[in-house]
Amino acid sequence: MENVNVYSQYRIEKGIEIIYQSIIQIDFSNEYLGTVYLRNPGKAEYIGDVIDMFGRYFIDNFGNDKSWFYGKPSVTDKKIIEIFGNKRGYIRVFYLSNVKETDYDSANKTKMRKFLQTPEEIEQNIKLSKSPVYLGWDKMNEDHKLRPLAEKIFNALVDENTYLKKNFNDNQFLHPMSLIRFAKKNKEYNDILKWLSNQNQ
């Protein structure tokens, strides 16, 4: 994993940092590795650099949109790369809420629900989500705003991603950092890692 570039559809709206989606590119490769869904962007690292000519050539495959900016990989980005086997290629990341916020409780109270993905955006994201797809938004039994979005995505993708249990409530949807940590001692989570990393051999 020599070079990691992160491209994000990024804007600031009413003083709030918003990330619509991100692309993690490893070693300048155009090989698709997978897609990840997270609750929200969390602690995305510095974003704002203008994309250079080589990055623009790559990112134009995802729409010639001026809102794409270059950023540095976060700890979560590095764990996402790890769950797909540390291979060369690119990984697409979608979110249920677009707010760039580390403290979920804080975001939940102040901003998170003001910037949810719309039904139209969810439909578009689903169409773009080729297997393998990892759903890493954590359990949300009490989250009545985000859960309907998560269930819609789950129902559309569960059949193609056979590591998932058929019943929504039977899945933990561990964040990538938790999946890596727990897989060291838990066979079920280790099997999920194996399934994800073996899809693009």
Image (tube, rainbow, N blue to C red):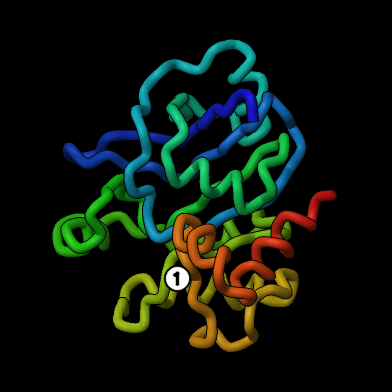
Q: Nearer the viewer, residue 141 or 124?
A: 141
Q: Amino acid at mark 1?
A: Leu
Depicted 160 relative to depicted 62: above or below: below
Q: Nearer the viewer, residue 66 or 134?
A: 134
Report whether residue 127 is seen: yes
Q: What residue do we see at 43% from left, 42% from top? A: 75
Q: What residue do we see at 60% from left, 24% from top? A: 3
Q: Nearer the viewer, residue 141 or 59?
A: 141
Q: What residue do we see at 27% from left, 39% from top? A: 17
Q: Nearer the viewer, residue 194 or 95?
A: 194
Relative to 118, is 144 on the left or the right? left
Neighbourhood count class around disc 1 (C-alpha, 10 Å): few under 14, some 14–19, many 20 upward? some
Q: Which residue is mark 1?
A: 149
Depicted 19 relative to depicted 163: above or below: above
Q: Position of residue 72 (x, y in %)?
A: 44, 28
Quarter of the view holding residue 197: bottom right
Depicted 197 relative to depicted 100: above or below: below
Most extreme residue toward the right is: 201
Relative to 175, is 60 on the left or the right? right
